[in-house]
Image: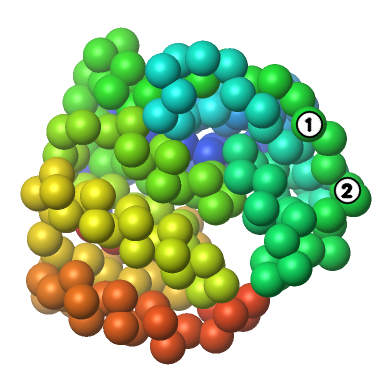
């Protein structure tokens, strides 16, 4: 990947993705909602990596309920309680293993206002992707967001909204290898094909990132 100036890592967790990609950007803004996880994330700060403690969503900058899950080092933590409590979720077994806290919120638009327009946005917020993406109102050159097969309805809403912003080419990545980038020729410029491919994925098994440009 050619070196770019700015990246937003939304749902940074403890910063593993940011650290793996630090040489691809002049600066990464890593945003994590859970204060417990953020305490570890901020230890990775550097001149190139800025960390901030917010939930990124379309909530008029008001505080929001956030569900910090103790399992898997907090990686399942989310603004969408359904991710932990709905029997259809692959993480239903963690339904009693979380606490509700209050998180500050920020929009992607506000991040752009404060830090500049990014070349790339990575969004991994555990089934809170739609609320996050709704806080963006202008097209960014490239972004990716997490999908999970049992929550295709969330992914479809994300895709539909991104299409209204001008996104036309998409790629489905299986899992989330941190330094993976799709080849230019691998993108598909038909949202219906992407939705059809997602609809064939196995619930509670398949997941990954959807790349959009």
Residue of label 1: 100
| Vertical arrangement, residue 99 with respect to residue 97, above or below | above
Please name the residue shown 52% across and 45% down the image.
128
Dot 2, how many residues are within 10 Å of its Cα: few (below 14), some (14-19), or many (20+)?
some
Residue of label 2: 97
Rendering coords of residue 189 (x, y %): 11, 71
Rendering coords of residue 177 (x, y %): 48, 64
Dot 1, how many residues are within 10 Å of its Cα: few (below 14), some (14-19), or many (20+)?
some
Q: Nearer the viewer, residue 63 or 208?
A: 63
Q: Quadrant of residue 171?
A: bottom left
The answer to whether residue 82 is left or right of residue 145 is right
Tag 1–tag 2 contact (CB < 8 Å): no
Name the residue at the right extreme.
Answer: 96
State the mark number for residue 193.
none
Rendering coords of residue 201 (x, y %): 47, 84
SS state under label 1: strand
Q: Give the CA distance from mark 1 to mark 2.
A: 10 Å
Please name the residue shown 38% across and 78% down the image.
198
SS state under label 2: loop
Q: Is residue 210 visible?
A: no
| Vertical arrangement, residue 177 with respect to residue 76, above or below | below
The answer to whether residue 40 is left or right of residue 196 is right
Q: Nearer the viewer, residue 41 or 159?
A: 159
Name the residue at the top extreme.
Answer: 114
Quadrant containing the C terminus is bottom left
């Amino acid at each position: 990947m050619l070196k770019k100036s700015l990246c937003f890592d939304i749902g940074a967790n403890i910063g593993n993705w940011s650290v793996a990609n630090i040489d691809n950007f002049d600066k990464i803004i890593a945003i994590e909602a859970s204060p417990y996880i953020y305490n570890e994330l901020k230890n990775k700060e550097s001149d190139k990596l800025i960390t901030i403690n917010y939930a990124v969503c379309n909530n008029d900058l008001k505080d929001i309920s956030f569900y910090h899950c103790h399992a898997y080092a907090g990686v399942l933590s989310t603004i969408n309680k359904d991710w932990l409590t709905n029997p259809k979720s692959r993480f239903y077994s963690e339904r009693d293993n979380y606490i509700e806290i209050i998180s500050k919120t920020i929009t992607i638009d506000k991040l752009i206002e404060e830090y500049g327009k990014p070349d790339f946005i990575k969004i991994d917020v555990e089934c809170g992707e739609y609320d996050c993406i709704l806080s963006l109102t202008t097209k960014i050159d490239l972004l990716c967001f997490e999908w999970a097969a049992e929550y295709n309805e969330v992914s479809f809403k994300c895709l539909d909204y991104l299409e209204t912003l001008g996104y036309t080419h998409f790629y489905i990545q299986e899992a989330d290898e941190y330094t993976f980038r799709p080849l230019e020729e691998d993108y598909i410029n038909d949202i219906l094909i992407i939705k059809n491919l997602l609809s064939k994925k196995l619930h509670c098994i398949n997941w990954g990132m959807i790349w959009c440009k």
